[in-house]
Amino acid sequence: MANVNSSSDQPVAMFKPFSWLSADAQYLPLASFAAKTFDIAQGISLIMEMIEDTQLCEDEEGRSPMLSGGQCGVLQRMVIATADALQSEARHAMDWLDEYGVKYYAPKQATRRAPNQNDRENSASTPATIDPALAVPDHKPVTDALCRLGAAVGCGTKGREAIKAVLLQFGASKLADVHPSNYEKVLAACAEYSTAAAH
């Protein structure tokens, strides 16, 4: 009888969802939206090229269309629905930029208002500097809080489940999917969960 390998001999599956972004860049505000927009734009472009090719076949003899008229209609409705969903998410992103974007991205004024015309011209030609403290998203405190929560509840499965429970409150499975406007709420949820676990 052949020997059966024990479960300890089996390689541990380490599935990581594909992303166009580096691991660090995935935590930047709106990074998930940018990557999603890239994928959707590629898909819409391909679908429209297929529909166009099908329509061109009507004017060419001897070439069968790739799609039927009904299939073209299905794909066109999918493109419309997808574009509508993307527009809605873009609106949320724009609202976030209006309310919170300055905190992360606004450049500091390079100089005070110039006293004369020459100084104004020189000032206008000088690029504004970016304060690194403003340019870097403030996700590190949230990451640290989640790590502390996991350690407080218990290493291993219990810690991971605690972190997952907090993120699920915001409809996310990882911090990169949490909207930056909810970071303060995540910190509060971590503190509340840690307090409850301590009692």
Image: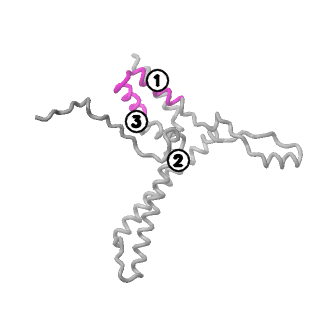
Q: Residue at x 72, y 40 (%)?
A: 129
| Other residues around mark 1 within 10 Å, as few (<14) / some (14–19) / many (≥20) | some
Which of pointers 1 and 2 indicates the residue nearer the eye? 1
Task: Name the element at disc 1.
Answer: helix
Mark 2: amino acid? His
Location of residue 94 with respect to 157 vertically, above or below? below
Q: Earlier in the sequence, mark 3 or mark 2?
A: 2
From the viewer's perspective, tell me whether residue 183 is left or right of residue 125: left
Residue marked by disc 1: 148
Q: Position of residue 68 (x, y in %)?
A: 34, 72
For the record, the magenta segment spans 141-167
Q: Residue at x 50, y 32 (%)?
A: 185
Q: Residue at x 64, y 33 (%)?
A: 133
Residue marked by disc 3: 168
The residue closer to the viewer here, 62 or 168, is: 62
Membership of 161 in magenta stretch: yes
Membership of 20 in magenta stretch: no
The residue closer to the viewer here, 149 or 63, is: 63
- Magenta stretch, main secondary structure class: helix
- Which residue of the protein is positioned furthest toward the top in this rendering? 199
Q: CA distance from mark 1 to mark 3?
A: 17 Å
Task: Name the element at disc 3.
Answer: helix
Mark 1: amino acid? Arg
Task: Name the element at disc 2.
Answer: helix
Q: CA distance from mark 3 to mark 2?
A: 20 Å
Residue marked by disc 2: 92
Numbered mark located on residue 11 in the image? none
Instruction: Classify the position of the N terminus by image quarter.
Output: top left
Q: CA distance from mark 1 to mark 2?
A: 30 Å
Instruction: Classify the position of the C terminus by image quarter.
Output: top left
Q: Position of residue 45 (x, y in %)?
A: 47, 63
Q: Are marks 3 and 2 in contact (CB under 8 Å)?
A: no
